[in-house]
Image: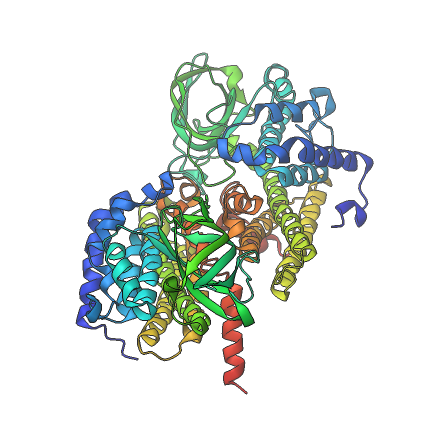
Amino acid sequence: MPAIEDYWPLADRQRELQQAARQFAQTEIRPQAAALDRSARFARDIYQGMGRQGLLGITIPSEWGGAGADTIAYALVMEELSVGYASIADQCGLVELCATLLHGLGTDYQKKRYLAPLLQAEATCSFALTEPDAGSDLGALVTTAEKTADGFVLNGSKIFIHNGPICDFALVLARTPARADGPRRRAMSIFIVEADTPGFSRGAREHKMGQRASELASLYFKDCRLTGDALLGTEGDGFKHMMMVLEKGRIGIASLSLGISRSALEESLQIFAGRVAAERPGADTQTIQWTLANMATDIYAARAMIAHASGLKDRGIPANMHASMAKLFASESAVKHTTAAVQIVGLQGYTQGSILERLYRDAKVTQIYEGTSEVQRIIISRDLQRNGLMP
Amino acid sequence: MDFQPTQSQQMTRRAVQEFVHKEVAPISQEPDKTAEFPLAMYRQALALEVLDITLPEALGGIGDDFLSFAIALEEFASGSAALAHSIAATEAVVYLLSRYGSNRQQQQYLRPLRAGEMFAGAVIWDPDAGSDPTGRLHAFPDGDGHRLSGTLPHVPLAPAAGLAIVFAMGVNDRISAFIVEKQMPGLTAAGPQEFMGMRGFPFGRLTFRDVFVSSDHRLGSTESGSKISDELLMRGETAVGAIAVGLSRAALEAAVKHSKARIQFGKPLAALQATQNKIADMAAAIQSARLLVYDAAFSLGQGKPPARQTAMAKLIASEMAVGVCREAVQIHGGYGYVKDYPVERLYRDALFSQLYPTVNEVQRKAVAQLTYRRIR
């Protein structure tokens, strides 16, 4: 299949990162994907490999250990890593979000303590927003940070937190007292909570359908005493801060979804090439041709949408609606096409160990995390009513 | 068609509902976790005489029609689709034996099958082998019988089964049906295969190396293989349709309950228009598939050739099930992706219906052919 560089000129740095990610996915990720799916464990060796290869913190300046590239490069890296295995791309995405917040909002002390080791893959992070009663509705957050003389006391819990079982620190969104000039219902702040903070604990590892090497657990905070250094960014503006990175987050998950679709298409093509070569009947039917054609069409469409949203963002133009559209389309496509791929291959694609079987399970959560499809529709529709269709 | 269920159909439904509520629902996640054939549950289900529903009275059965059995399957599947499939697979063998078997074959196999002491699966003859092109058996005449060679990659219940009904191509491309037994020299079974879902319904691979099958193990006449296989396929399609409906009902029920309990944006999800639209579409899709399945099952019982209805029922019901379970997971959000919630399993189970007993391509082909024949 033609690669993106064949029809879309990339800057040298973008191409370099894309190639590095592709190479890494082929040699380091793909051979381990099936085993990781089975063991359902965080792949520390691959994570450290990403750190060594410079595949963490794609948009973070190199002085902090990032790749110093743009959002387009980040999207390309996420796509390539996800072709290897979505759970690995998920780590890259998680680091990107946490690193963007740390770099954009952190003090020098915070950057040295958290950002640098994170981008070296010496530390692992979590991004803790969701609560048992606050999923799509973040306004319903109840985790609270009370102010004390020398800092804060954190109480509450978070659910379905990626890296929950293994993270060294978590960026936690919690309610703080409303400032006179700040938001009320969304008076929240971001806290960096280290895993050895007394009062911090983790729930049991969740058993999941797919993306199983992205470990998930609840996080609990019981009278966690935090110093003032734990506050990231402006007190009371946490919700706003988080919203700033969600755009990048959605572009990342759109690319991850695209990687799943691409992987499904590449695997299907390989299976049918084999069947045609073996002159087996039924391997070259129109049903199969149509399915493959639809997959490829949506892959190119998703890629264009992602490139468009990333390009807007890199030029400083609000990409909120376009990032949501890309995420909505790419994730729905991934679910649709992994289903279709299993369908044309038959029970062989339903058997554990087959790549398509894993992709079908991996795909579904892309419609759920980083804002469900329903939330994306709300965002798109709100933006449309406010600003119309352009840019 | 009469839409009013008969009294015996209503009784069957109620009996299975009660059984599912008491015995299946509390442990419906178990077969998925262990990937083991739910033997105890299966035997309990057989105690309801479900394998007797369509069996003629002369052979000790109830002699009811296939619609009654489809209703039972739907209810079993609302608790455990894997259990329902195991029952349907065995029922197919019981039916073939009762319809085409010799006295000896009936006497030897029917009782242990109905008692749950013996397991058996049957694999249709797929002329295109569209599902898996390697799945072909060949029969070579040899003295008083045949020698079978080839591989069947996916045979239901094969790991546990002592018996299978298979189809093989013989001289002049004629298809014959054979009853093969596990201990026959040259026959090896491998499995169970690890599937993504439907994990309590085990499959295995049967490899035949010059397996001698005497003539008293042939089912029906040498010429009748294709017809028997067609009949097996039609019953299989209808059964898969009924199971897809039952499984989808379970997903809908879970989605409705979750959407009522889950509060977001200050109200239950159920109060959101987007959720209501989903639930409405799911319910309407289930009911339309269900009517198609009942139509197919009813026609099967009338002895008319109902190929078009059964293929349509399987096609529509299986794709409906995948869509309904996808939306059920979506309504659950993150909860739907973790294994504590049944919709996580249902999403994996549902896809099976699109692949078994054949991929839906085979059903589409049948419907297209019959439609072209009908509209000239």
Q: Give the quadrant of residue A18.
A: top right
Front position in the image: B322 or A71: B322
Q: Give the quadrant of residue A74.
A: top right
Front position in the image: B307 or B169: B169
Q: Is residue A25 visible?
A: yes
Q: Is residue A58 left or right of residue B220?
A: right
Q: Position of residue A293 (x, y in %)?
A: 66, 59
Q: Give the quadrant of residue A259.
A: top right
Q: Position of residue A296 (x, y in %)?
A: 67, 55
Q: Position of residue A39 (x, y in %)?
A: 49, 31
Front position in the image: A142 or B175: B175
Q: Residue at x 63, y 34 (%)?
A: A31
Task: State the colouring used for the structure image.
Answer: rainbow
Q: Which residue extends farthest front?
A: B143
Vertical relation: B108 (above or below) B159 = below
Q: Position of residue B124 (x, y in %)?
A: 45, 63
Vertical relation: B198 (above or below) B95 = above
Q: In the rendered view of the protein, which quadrant contains the N terminus of chain B?
A: bottom left
Front position in the image: B188 or B369: B188
Q: In the rendered view of the protein, which quadrant contains the C terminus of chain B?
A: bottom right
Q: Is residue A70 visible?
A: no
Q: Is residue B18 left or right of residue B318?
A: left
Q: Which residue extends farthest bottom?
A: B376
Q: Is residue B362 left or right of residue A277?
A: left
Q: Is residue B266 left or right of residue A84?
A: left
